[in-house]
């Protein structure tokens, strides 16, 4: 979290209004918005650019609307100047930090006594001192904590039942920085480690980047930080699967490309991508994020690379679009149709294509594991990742079958290879509970897209629950309280028609409907509103990718893909919270082509700029 940079590159619109009508309007696609102080310590927002005169607006009696902050948008209403500043296309992470600085500075100043001045205001105006602006001082994390603690106490006093000071219209008179309090303080940010920072720097510098790493090395966490650093209007976030795309607030790669399943000829694919709505997205895109790149079929990747060049009329690799690719080829592979898998010309993985070698400039491998802290378990997983099972590893995993890992009435979630097995187990367990079921139907913005939303959101269109049902939370609700994606618990009762869940950490939470938004590149926005829960006696290995489970039981009897066993076992936090059933070394293997790719990973210096992270340069 960088709170030192009190400036923002973005698009702006300024509107001066009087009696509800716009008197003057100024818009610029590229501007630098900065926080400044004059000589008597007043705070200003300075708006500067190459093609317009610098404008300074005093941060006093302002209202900040931050509903769309995650989309890089906000507005600041300067009431005394009858002016509204609209900010858009700002990197959401930088916008968050910019508003945090405003939050700190305004609350710091509100608690200070203005310094006395020997010079009158009239003399200062005549001397021009008030028209001289300096950079605002940096904000530290401690500064942020002090201010948030102070504001929290004020809010607690003003909202207590015994307080009569709070008026009915208090929301309109509360200082704007306090309005941001809950949203800003709930987004606690963890600093990147050195290897993650190097990946971020390469992305910011405009390189085509591929970064990989074993399960639990923070790939998704880093990817979200990268997305938050780039301007949203020209950045398209995609993933190979709908759930992975929803996890990063994006769409599937197929949806972005606009060429259907990509099975048509290249001319047909170009024709499909040249439709007005699809073409406009291709042309505006400057940064393309692809998560879970390991599950993107090589021939499809090769096809969209050529489509990009042709529809953008740009002969550079991928039509000049910056690529940021993330994934682990030693986890789940692409799903290939049987007739294509038997073809000698089929290129299963992206790295097997000519397009990969032309597009990818910088490669990184994250090596520090965050999910597991036990060195023995990390070593076992690293061996399983490459398909190596020693006698010691086999015996250690076989011994886990006897472990009692259930507790507090919550059974271990069983990870299964087949979705059919998952549904059978969950339905049988639910049916065995006494009492009536309560059905929660999702509210979809478009009923014709229910099946699509089933694939692109982590919650079902119809959720059946009973008292005693074991469930998993499918969205981060309150990170500090452990109410995070993957937290498991038991429905203990229904209150006001909503499930009250007691989670494994003993926290009770009345689960309210949440909204998932799917934003196709075409601009249409679809949404699903549903209780953020799924039945969790069993879960599929494919859908568990990216989750961290506090207690897991893994059945390997039906494993059918390379890397599938590794993905399942790596969901657990430790060996003590893992129970492995049907373990056999024959169920653990890695694809030979992938092993060769990683073996040559650091030998491809002539084609790629390879930076092995986590090691000091000699």
Image: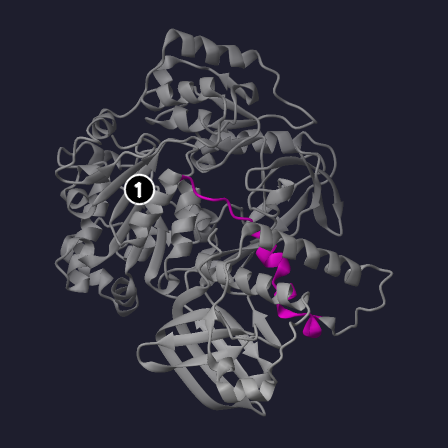
Q: Is residue 524 visible?
A: no
What span is in magenta?
Answer: 171-193
> Which of 153/15 is in front?
153
Please tell me in which quadrant of the rendered image residue 46 appears: bottom left
Badge 1 element: helix
Please tell me in which quadrant of the rendered image residue 152 appears: bottom right
Q: Is residue 269 left or right of residue 28?
A: left
Is 175 magenta? The answer is yes
Q: Is residue 376 visible?
A: yes
Image spot of residue 206 (x, y percent): 26, 54
Q: Is residue 613 left or right of residue 567?
A: left
Is 388 above or below relative to 468?
above
Q: Is residue 275 left or right of residue 160?
A: left
Q: Residue at x 59, y 58 (%)?
A: 183
Q: Residue at x 41, y 8 (%)?
A: 392
Is 321 above or below relative to 483?
below
> Which of 66/270 is in front?
66
Is 553 above or below relative to 181?
above
Q: Residue at x 25, y 67 (%)?
A: 275
Image spot of residue 51 (x, y percent): 31, 80
> Which of 286/170 is in front?
170
Residue placed under numbered mark 1 in the picture: 293
Dot 1: within a 10 Å radius of its alpha carbon, few (fewer than 14), some, or many (20 or more) residues? many
Image spot of residue 572 (x, y percent): 51, 27
Please tell me in which quadrant of the rendered image residue 100 appears: bottom right
Is 33 magenta? The answer is no
Image spot of residue 64 (x, y percent): 57, 71
């Amino acid at each position: 979290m960088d709170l030192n940079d009190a400036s923002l590159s973005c698009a702006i619109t300024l509107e001066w209004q009087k009696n509800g009508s716009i008197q003057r309007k100024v818009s610029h696609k590229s501007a630098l918005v900065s926080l400044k102080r004059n000589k008597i310590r007043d705070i200003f927002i300075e708006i500067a650019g190459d093609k317009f005169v610098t404008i300074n607006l005093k941060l006093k009696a302002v209202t900040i609307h931050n509903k769309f902050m995650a989309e890089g948008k906000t507005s600041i209403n300067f009431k005394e100047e009858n002016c509204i500043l609209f900010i858009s296309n700002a990197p959401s992470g930088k916008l968050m930090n910019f508003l945090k600085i405003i939050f700190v500075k305004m609350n710091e100043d509100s608690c200070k006594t203005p310094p006395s001045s020997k010079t009158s205001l009239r003399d200062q105006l005549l001397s021009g001192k008030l028209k001289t602006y300096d950079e605002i001082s940096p904000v530290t994390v401690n500064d942020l904590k002090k201010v948030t603690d102070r504001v929290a106490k004020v809010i607690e006093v003003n909202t207590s039942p015994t307080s009569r000071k709070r008026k009915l219209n208090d929301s309109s008179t509360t200082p704007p920085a306090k309005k941001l309090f809950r949203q800003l303080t709930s987004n606690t940010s963890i600093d990147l480690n050195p290897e993650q920072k190097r990946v971020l720097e390469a992305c910011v510098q405009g390189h085509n980047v591929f970064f990989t790493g074993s399960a639990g090395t923070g790939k998704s966490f880093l990817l979200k930080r990268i997305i938050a650093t780039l301007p949203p209007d020209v950045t398209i976030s995609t993933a190979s699967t709908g759930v992975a795309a929803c996890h990063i607030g994006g769409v599937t790669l197929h949806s972005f490309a606009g060429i259907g399943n990509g099975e048509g000829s290249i001319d047909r694919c170009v024709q499909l991508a040249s439709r007005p709505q699809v073409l406009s997205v291709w042309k505006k895109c400057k940064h393309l994020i692809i998560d879970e790149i390991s599950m993107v079929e090589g021939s499809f990747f090769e096809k969209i690379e050529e489509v990009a060049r042709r529809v953008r009329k740009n002969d550079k690799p991928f039509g000049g679009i910056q690529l940021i690719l993330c994934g682990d080829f030693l986890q789940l592979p692409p799903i290939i149709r049987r007739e294509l898998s038997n073809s000698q010309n089929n290129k299963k993985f992206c790295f097997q294509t000519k397009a990969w070698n032309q597009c990818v400039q910088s490669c990184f491998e994250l090596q520090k594991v965050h999910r597991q802290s036990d060195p023995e378990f990390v070593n076992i997983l690293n061996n399983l990742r490459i398909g190596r099972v020693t006698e010691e590893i086999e015996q250690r995993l076989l011994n886990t079958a006897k472990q009692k890992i259930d507790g507090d009435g919550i059974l271990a979630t069983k990870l299964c290879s087949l979705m059919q097995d998952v549904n059978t187990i969950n339905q049988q367990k639910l049916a065995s509970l006494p009492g009536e079921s309560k059905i929660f139907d999702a509210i979809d913005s478009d009923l014709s897209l229910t099946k699509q939303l089933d694939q692109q959101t982590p919650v079902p269109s119809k959720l059946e629950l009973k008292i005693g049902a074991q469930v998993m939370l499918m969205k981060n609700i309150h990170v500090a309280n452990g109410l995070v994606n993957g937290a498991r618990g038991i429905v203990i009762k229904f209150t006001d028609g909503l499930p009250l869940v007691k989670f494994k950490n003993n926290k009770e939470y009345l689960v309210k409907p949440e909204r998932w938004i799917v934003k196709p590149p075409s601009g249409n926005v679809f949404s699903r509103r549903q209780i953020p829960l799924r039945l969790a006696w069993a879960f599929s290995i494919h859908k568990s990718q990216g989750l961290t489970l506090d207690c897991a039981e893994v059945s390997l009897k039906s494993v059918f893909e390379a890397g599938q066993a590794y993905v399942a076992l790596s969901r657990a936090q430790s060996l003590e919270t893992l129970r492995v059933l049907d373990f056999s070394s024959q169920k653990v293997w890695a694809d030979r082509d992938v092993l060769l790719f990683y073996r040559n990973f650091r030998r491809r210096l002539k084609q790629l700029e390879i930076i092995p992270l986590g090691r000091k340069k000699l």
